[in-house]
Image (cartoon, helix red, strand yellow):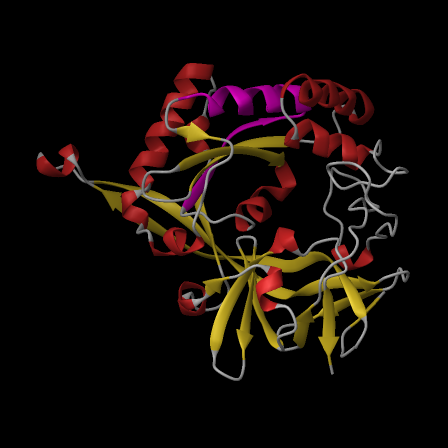
Amino acid sequence: IFQSGPWCYGLIPRTFKIDMSFHSKEYVGYGGLDQFIGTVHAREVIRYRTRFQGIVSQEEGDRELHVITPGEKIAFTKPTQEYCRWHSGDLENGVDPVRRAYCLGKATSKLGYCAKHRQSLKAIYSKCFELAGIESIRNCQILDEKAGDKIEYAVYILAYSSSGLKVGATRYWRLIYRIAEQPHVLATMVYKSKSAIKTRELEVRIGKLSGLTEKPKRSLNEALSTPLVTVVYRIEKIRDKIAKAFAIRNIGENPIFRVEPGIEVVPYIRAKEKGVRELEGLRLEVIDYYSGYLLLSYPNNNNYYIVRGNELLHRNVLKTIS
């Protein structure tokens, strides 16, 4: 159950609700030596578009969810509490975020879970793929024991600039949505498995290859303005390198794709990145959400701002303005 409309209460943002749709296919060429000797290659790139439906939020002490939709006015307040990020629903399938039951317990673990849910399946998944070293591997083993073969995982590579490449892992059904949460130019899947530990171990090993990283410093503006032609050859070559290094078959059959915002990119390029504290108290209009950033405008002077979504989630940081 959810509502849409104006409130004047303190709200906890829980997630950003987006829909995804296929937009187009195109062939992107690349040159270099091949172009010099007269053979120009082209690779198919699939484009998806997002449609932002709103910020799924709840009042402190109230389990009912509200959706703050594009066009509504909000203001940031200084957060005083972080709440448990655990939610109901299984891991192997997508759950409509407005139908989740979010926990209102206070976060006590470093990954943002309350005492009750820090050993939940969702928390174990987070520790498997977000922590490092022995603790990560141990929780991946526990995840495999508890989930069996019910969950499929994917390892992907993502180009976030003309030269920057990242490796990551997620649940297979979330792959396109996970890419949509990150600044990127192009991405492709390189491995799929029903074993969390095999997936995580391969992700770590790929991250040690030259030119790849698990934790890059990225710019949304750079990702949006980088031409695809400068990246498609590079992402294809690193994919081939991974296939040879780890004996992964049929890796080239996985599509290369890109997720784009459902609105024009100009406001994102014009926007200034700000922290919550810098915008505290301003009357701001919700515009869009893309690549992990909430896009806002300040109606009085037509300025655009982007705020990192992870600064907002599970904190009592919002209020709506009627």
Q: Nearer the viewer, residue 122 or 107?
A: 107
Residue 251: x and y in percent read: 45, 27
Task: Give percent across and percent down for residue 48.
Answer: 49, 55
Instruction: Give the answer, above or below, for where 297 lies relative to 95.
Output: below
Q: Quadrant of residue 11?
A: bottom right
Judge left or right: residue 303 versus residue 128: left
Q: Looking at the picture, does residue 54 appear above or below residue 222? A: below
Tell which of 122 and 151 is nearer to you.
Answer: 122
Location of residue 6 in the rendering, given as x and y in whole percent from the top left corner: 76, 79
Query: Residue drawn 53% across and 74% down?
Result: 297
State whether residue 195 appears in this view. Answer: no
Any magenta on residue 318?
Answer: no
Quadrant, the N terminus: bottom right
Q: Is residue 164 above or below residue 104?
A: above
Residue 190 belongs to magenta span? yes
Residue 194 in picture, x, y percent from top left: 67, 25
Tell me which segment is drawn in magenta: 186-209
Residue at the image position 36 percent from the left and 35 percent from the top: 235
Q: Would residue 121 be seen by someone viewing this image from the given angle?
A: yes
